[in-house]
Amino acid sequence: MAEHWYKNALLYCLDVKTFADGNGDGIGDFAGLTEKLQYLAGLNVDCVWLQPFHPSPMRDNGYDITDYYGVDPRLGTLGDFAEFSRCARDKGIRVMIDLVVNHTSIDHPWFQAARSDPHSPYRDYYVWADEKPADAAEGTVFPGEQTTTWTWDREAKAYYFHRFYDHQAELNISNPAVRREIEKITGFWLQMGVTGFRIDALPFLIELKGLDAEGEIDPHDYLRELRHHVQTLRGDVCLMAEANLPPEDVPDYFGDGDKIHMSFNFWVNQHLFLALARHDATPVRVAWEQLPPLPVWCQWNNFLRSHDELDLGRLSDKERQEVFRAFGPEPDMQLYERGIRRRLAPMLGNDRRRLEMAHSLMLTLPGTPVLRYGDEIGMGDDLGLPDRESVRTPMQWDASANGGFSSAPPEQLVLPVIAQGEYGFEQVNVEQQRHDPQSLLNWLERVTRRRKECPAFGLGDCSFIDTGLAHVLAHRCEYQGTTLFALHNFADKRARFKLPLGAAGTQTGCVHDILAGHRHELQRDGHYQVELEPFGYRWLMCETGA
């Protein structure tokens, strides 16, 4: 059976404005991004996921949109996007964009029309109340910065609902006209060469809070409607959800394979960092085994860090404090009472062994891995910047001024480049690592290439193997007659154990260490004697004789 492209791809997430500046004005743009496509191809990237690039007042990093059909003029023109899309396609790289339709900016023409005229057809595009609901303080997404989900609008003389900031008014998904607008938006960008959409804040998009329709219809049915629409327009489209789901909610979002295609695996991600903090692999295994099976055409997205804070909201209070102590012990490292606003390399102490092990696990767990820009070279963070901006600094290309990101004066940059310390651009950059065969960048290029040769990791049936050691995670992936094994040591001590690979009495079998290129004979009882160094990992294939 043929598999859809998204089930075994490598996705690369970037923000156009902080990736590469093509015109020297201090802001990344599509011209600069297009010039870097060859770099992404060399990294074995299958699909580029772009964060919002539409016109926006930029109160929330572009997630407050005023025009869904345009490009922020600072980033280029619609023609520049079309050229980028064409060049990406020529290199075999697909393009996925953020679909931010849970809310609009209050500066959007729809909201301006809605607030100015109660009889405007756009009034019902949003959610209104004459009186402030009693539960207005409940369900805020940004504790410490947000105190209510309902805000009074003087011009409209009513309260409007906003799950996020008060400048991001919630769209009314129960209104057929709003759903039709979403159809037009997705149709437009599919015609522009986009292959997929990362649906921002999906659980909030389909909620009916504050509406008369609440409790009368199943909002999840809209996912089938949207899936049918986009897949009718383009058969190879992919809907990738940002949905922080507990295991019991997973089936509502995937359906019978007729709703979303993929979702970020927040459940395993949060337990992965608990495992890293404890030097104990158990939380990863338990979390994975708690997930229900997915329909055949659906997939998980495995990731280490995203463009936001490391969200630990699904952990217990005690577990969250464990992770805070390990990776974000200072108050200014924490955010929204649930997350850590640091990049991966600083959290792991810039320990190359732990960085490799974490990436290896992301690449070998069944699912589609998502790499965040800059993590391939071990970029750091700038805690002097506010909130989530700390992990959104410009890409560090070389040791020249501004890290090669832009030729503009430093004060004109959209965000300052990290210039000092062990993560400064003179120490951490693409060009320097390109010339170092042992660099993190070159290591990641090699392992992503090998990952492409091992589809069983992404597509196979996964089962875990008991090694008798809590700090070792061992899993088996079987796919189309191939069986692969992945071993990961979460502790800073060596691990020795026997791994069952072949049938007892097999005398001609051997084990292929995929990454090292070595082959070792199996023991007569079908076991392989393993020794993992601290934070070590192995990718193995068992080859047995007739």
Image (spheres, rainbow, N blue to C red):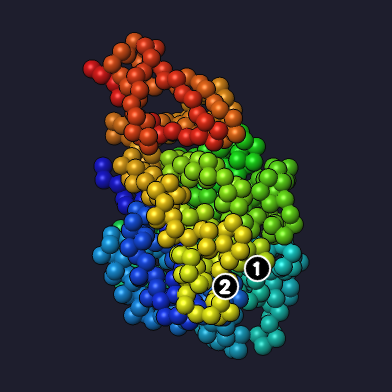
Relative to 88, 250 lies left or right: right
Q: Quadrant of the N terminus?
A: top left
Q: Quadrant of the C terminus?
A: top left
Residue sitting nearer the eye, 52 or 3: 52
Q: Does dot 2 land on a helix, a strand or a loop?
A: loop
How far from the left and from the top, in percent, is residue 537? 47, 35
Q: Residue at x 32, y 75 (%)?
A: 82
Tell me which amino acid carries mark 1: Leu
The residue where tag 1 is placed is: 385
The residue where tag 2 is placed is: 415
Q: Quadrant of residue 285?
A: top right
Q: Is residue 485 above or below residue 11?
A: above
How far from the left and from the top, in percent, is residue 538? 44, 33
- Are the two marked residues, 1 and 2, in contact with CB atoms closer than 8 angstroms? yes
Residue sitting nearer the eye, 27 or 473: 27
Q: Quadrant of residue 94?
A: bottom left
Tell me which amino acid carries mark 2: Leu
